[in-house]
Amino acid sequence: MSLTPDQLQRIAHLARIDVSPQEARDVTEQLNQVLGLIDQLQAVDSRGIEPMSHALDAQLAVQQRLRPDTVTEPDRRADYQALAPAVERGLYLVPKVIE
């Protein structure tokens, strides 16, 4: 699959993006390279290959490094609520917006 500059201009118009004719030619060339790569990937026979949930090998234990669960800021709730126009039982009161 490949795009022509006219097709790209139409897509840009539908997306409300202003694209000059030179930009359309450049972007069309780049998009056609991407679409060519996708065509190559789709041509590969991947039957029998189990999908991976992560790019690293499944045998590796992938774990996210976590920071210690400690309080780093003081509780300033009372200070913030003192500045609010309306507070009731620890909750901020706001005007009704749905009629």
Image: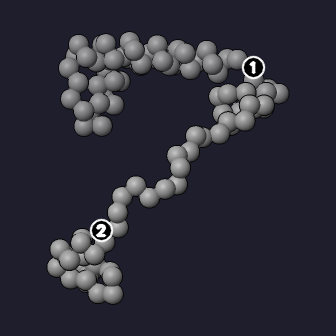
Judge left or right: residue 52 versus residue 4: right
Q: Quadrant of residue 49?
A: top right
Q: Quadrant of residue 25?
A: top left
Find residue 58 and report its horizontal and vertical position in percent: 75, 32
Disc 2 element: loop
Q: Looking at the image, can residue 60 be seen?
A: yes
* x 78%, y 31%: residue: 59
Q: Amino acid at mark 2?
A: Arg
Q: Amino acid at mark 1?
A: Asp
Q: Quadrant of residue 99?
A: bottom left
Disc 1 element: loop
- Upstream in sequence: badge 2 or badge 1: 1
Find residue 61 and report its horizontal and vertical position in percent: 72, 35
Q: Is residue 71 above or below residue 79?
A: above
CA separation, marks 2 and 1? 59 Å
The residue indicated by pointer 1 is 45
Local packing at callout 1 (Cα closer than 10 Å; few below 14, some 14-19, many 20+) is few
Give whichever of 62, 9 is nearer the camera: 62
* x 24%, y 79%: residue: 94
Judge left or right: residue 69 versus residue 48: left
The residue indicated by pointer 2 is 76
Identify the disc placed on residue 75: none
Find residue 71 and report its horizontal and vertical position in percent: 44, 58
Colouring chosen for the image of the structure:
one colour
* x 35%, y 24%: residue: 7
Numbered marks: total = 2
Q: Looking at the image, can residue 51 be seen?
A: no
Q: Is residue 90 above or below residue 43?
A: below
